[in-house]
Amino acid sequence: MFRELLNLIKPGTALPTDERRDTVRLHCSIAATLKDGKTTREIRVINASLTGLAIELESKLRKKAVVTIHREQFGGAVEGTVVWCRALRGSNRYQVGVTYKEDREMLRASWIKPALKSLGFTVGRINEKRQLTRVPGHHRRCFLKSLQGETYSPGELKNLSLGGALVESEVEIPRGLRLILKTDPVPGIAELVMEAEIKSCKRDPKTRRYLCGLKFVNGDEKLLKKHMTVLMDEC
């Protein structure tokens, strides 16, 4: 179904084989109405993706409940299944995860398709205003290099945005260091080379490697958008 919705947003897209749920989620604040059987509740959609939604409301929903979420003026209802529900600490509100029902025609007629587009989820076009939108790196190899071109560490691109990247590194790199991020080339696109500053570096106890948060300070933004588009197409 994830692939079906991707194809609705961009008709003719080759169907990807990777259907992991770590697809990019866009934060939002959308007022909507949820119906659970005969009960109607006012809710707020707090993030959206190609696989489902996260919502916030004042009452608990049971796991596996089938719900419909309405925004009549923007399209038909979205039907889905509750996959998790948790109380917000220090609040009487709950957050709930909902996966879409596998129904292509329902999704085609629903409000979710135009909503995803308006949030910058148009495949092949990264909205300049969505600098915090991060797309998965799909295990792409990269290198962290000094400004003089010496390699600090090979790495793996975890995600990429207009503002920066998250990279898995073999070595710890100090915060504040300026360096170069260089990724493997993609067929038909030049390799990505961006000057960046290390904003964070934390060791992952599971892999014993370091997750480095990078903020871009210089580089070819048009080329960066092309690489983000390729990564989004791979979702």
Image: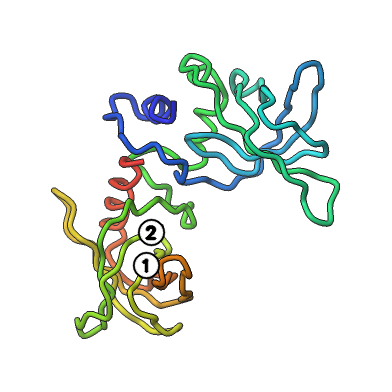
Q: Secondary structure at mark 2?
A: strand
Distance from Cα at disc 2 to Cα at disc 1: 7 Å
Residue 23 in sight from this viewpoint: yes
Task: Check contact, mark 2 vs mark 1: CB within 8 A.
Answer: yes
Q: Which mark is residue 158?
A: 2
Q: Position of residue 198 (x, y in %)?
A: 42, 77
116 w.r.t. 11: above or below: below
Could you say which quadrant of the image residue 216 lies in?
bottom left
Q: Determine whether, in the image, residue 102 is placed left or right of residue 226.
A: right
Is 168 in front, or is 159?
168
> Dot 2, how many residues are within 10 Å of its Cα: few (below 14), some (14-19), or many (20+)?
many
Looking at the image, tell me whether mark 2 or mark 1 is earlier in sequence order: 2
Q: Position of residue 32 (x, y in %)?
A: 70, 31
Q: Amino acid at mark 1?
A: Glu
Residue ID at (82%, 39%): 58
Is 118 in front, or is 46?
46
Q: Amino acid at mark 2?
A: Lys
Identify the residue under disc 1: 168
